[in-house]
Image: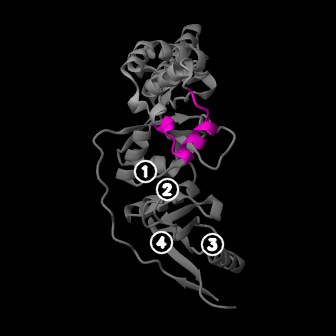
Amino acid sequence: MVCLCVCARISVYGPGMSSAPVKLYLHKDRILVWNAEDVNKIRCQHRIVGTQVGCFPRCPYQNAVLGLPVQFAMEEARLLISKGFCVLVENTKLSQPPTDDERAHVDKCADDVYQEQAEAIMAQRKAEIEQQAEKIVAGLVRKSRGQHVSKKARKKLKKSGSTEFREGNSSTELSEVQAAEIEAQREAVIADVMKSRVSTPSRDITLAPVLYECLRTKASDLVPAELNYPRTDAHKVRCRVFEDLWEKGHYMTVGSKFGGDFLVYSGDPLLFHAFGVVVCLGRDRKVAGRDIVMWGRLGNAVHKTIILATLRDDQVHYISLRWSGEL
């Protein structure tokens, strides 16, 4: 059978106030945040998670792991703005095509990033060659003097315990003449190896930077924007339910993949599984018996409590459904 019970209220959590409001960017009815520090601030201080919707520069053809920007649901954005944690702005520059000067500026920034990475890679490769320079020069000196021994011959000499192997192949027992030759040829060998074996890295293998601000944007291009939400009674119910659960100390994410409006967590979703699926019901919504059965079986299948939420007398009321026995 299906068991109906009233959800117990949890003590209200007092969120810490942020010192400066974070900018939420409105673009084509989507609320985005591009800066990782701002995303972390919103998550850690205000318990608003959002959804990562950006692909990685080097892995664009997959959606298993996503990154910046983070998109916030309308309910999340409304709460952040109403509490004074964030401000909503719109970038007027994005609605205009870039000029030739702006294109040149963006190309120059990309080229500067590539040059910095190329110089760092070449310097690292040169340092690695310098560490092995003495061994390289010593090998060249032995080879020029006819003292080079192949690997096969070296193994035979090692097995036989030959004194020739111990004396002729130990780099620590080089003569003073050989040491002088190594020091004289060291810089020349390094330059030759860098020229013949080390090439400038191509743009295809360098790291692509993740920009959290548009290179074309100036402070004057950001203008205050209106959220224009909620627009319907159903939106009002969702906003009130989301705010009420947030004030009780819960984390929430979008619950569409579980057939609900929100997923409820007792802690950060990175550390906890959702314990409930919230379904928001309008004031005039009629609930049939098969709806109760459907929600009950859904909650049993995904191992979560179904929480029905609605507004009555301007207060949020909850009913939880859990499959507690056999029919």
Spatial CA span between label 4 and label 1 = 19 Å
Quarter of the rendering containing residue 172: top left
Q: Pick whichever of labels 3 and 2 is earlier in the sequence.
A: 2
Q: Pick whichever of labels 4 and 3 is earlier in the sequence.
A: 3
Q: Please state the horizontal and vertical placement of residue 134, each as a whole percent of the image.
A: 44, 24
- Disc 2 residue type? Cys
Please state, as top left, top right, bottom left or bottom right, where the N terminus lies in the image. Answer: bottom right
Q: Residue at x 35, y 39 (%)?
A: 21
- Disc 4 residue type? His
Q: Please state the horizontal and vertical placement of residue 4, each as a whole percent of the image.
A: 55, 83
> Is residue 89 visible to us here?
no
Please state, as top left, top right, bottom left or bottom right, where the C terminus lies in the image. Answer: bottom right
Secondary element at image label 2: helix
Q: Please state the horizontal and vertical placement of residue 288, each as a whole percent of the image.
A: 69, 77
Q: What label sits on residue 302 in the rendered view?
A: 3
- Disc 3 residue type? Val
Read off the residue under disc 2.
239
